[in-house]
Amino acid sequence: MSRQDVLARIRAALAAAPTAARAPAAEALAATVSEAEALVPAHGVPPEPSNRAPHGPAGAPAGDPVALFVERSHQVGVKVERVASIAAAAVRVATICAGRGVRVAAAWHDHDLAEVLSAVRGAGVAVLPADASPAEVAAADAGITGADWGIAESGTLVLASRPGRPRLASLLPAVHVAVLRADRILLDLAALFARTAGMPSALTFVSGPSRSADIGFTPVLGAHGPTEVVVLVVEG
């Protein structure tokens, strides 16, 4: 994405933001400093990191990674839906595309997403080929991917790039829709690396919509990536 494209996205996001959300740079910086100071004890030594598993949401078992993933994903601005099967996920993806006026989608051409892409095409959405150019992917209305893993403690999607699974599909379109199997959700990053024998050429970690506060310390969504991330957790 070019410099002009990034700046154009920032201008559009700022223009659409409520006036109250545009705090002066000094106030935003002071808030950031205050947050950092709150993390350091009075004696100036940061607390030791805990080795205990993160707490789950109210009413959920402490070690329930799926419930924790849903909670943490919501905290970072991700919309999560739990569905019973891949067939239900296919219907939801098609509905999401229709509701957002998606006409062209960049997608993984993966066996696990075959039913999803069939439903999307049936809804009148054109799906780009796997080898589409970066410019074509950037112009797509949505990106549709699977996910190799989910990290519960941070609400993070982990996507491995392989033939037919272009990583730009999750990075360039304004809307990213991901289909994740519930049994692929792990508690933390250590659990991920314990299961990763060999690293792919590219491993993408997605924790919510794209964010930037580089200009005037004003948070902006979608400056260099999706403004919306939707995850369908398939439990069946």
Image (tube, grey):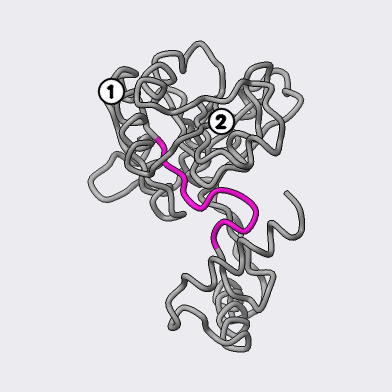
Number of numbered markers = 2
Disc 2, SS: strand
Categorize mark 1 by other alpha carbons within 10 Å: few (<14), some (14-19), many (20+): some
Please say if 85 is above or below 41: above
The amino acid on which the numbered mark 1 sits, given as a three-letter code, is Ala
Is 12 in the magenta?
no
**At 28% across and 28% down in the image, what residue appears?**
83
**At 34% across and 37% down in the image, what residue appears?**
98
- Give coordinates of residue 32: x percent, y percent: 59, 77
The answer to which of 190 and 178 lies nearer the viewer is: 178
- Give coordinates of residue 5: x percent, y percent: 69, 56
Asked where in the image residue 116 lies, by quadrant, the reply is top left
Instruction: Answer left or right for 141 relative to 11.
Output: left
- Give coordinates of residue 184: x percent, y percent: 46, 24
Asked where in the image residue 166 lies, by quadrant, the reply is top right
Categorize mark 2 by other alpha carbons within 10 Å: few (<14), some (14-19), many (20+): many
Mark 2 and mark 1: Cα distance apart in space: 21 Å
Q: Provide the residue designation for mark 1.
A: 88
Asked where in the image residue 205 lies, by quadrant, the reply is top right
The amino acid on which the numbered mark 2 sits, given as a three-letter code, is Ala
Instruction: Answer left or right for 115 relative to 37.
Output: left
Task: Specify the segment rendered in magenta.
Answer: 221-231
Label number found at residue 151: none
Q: Provide the residue designation for mark 2.
A: 106
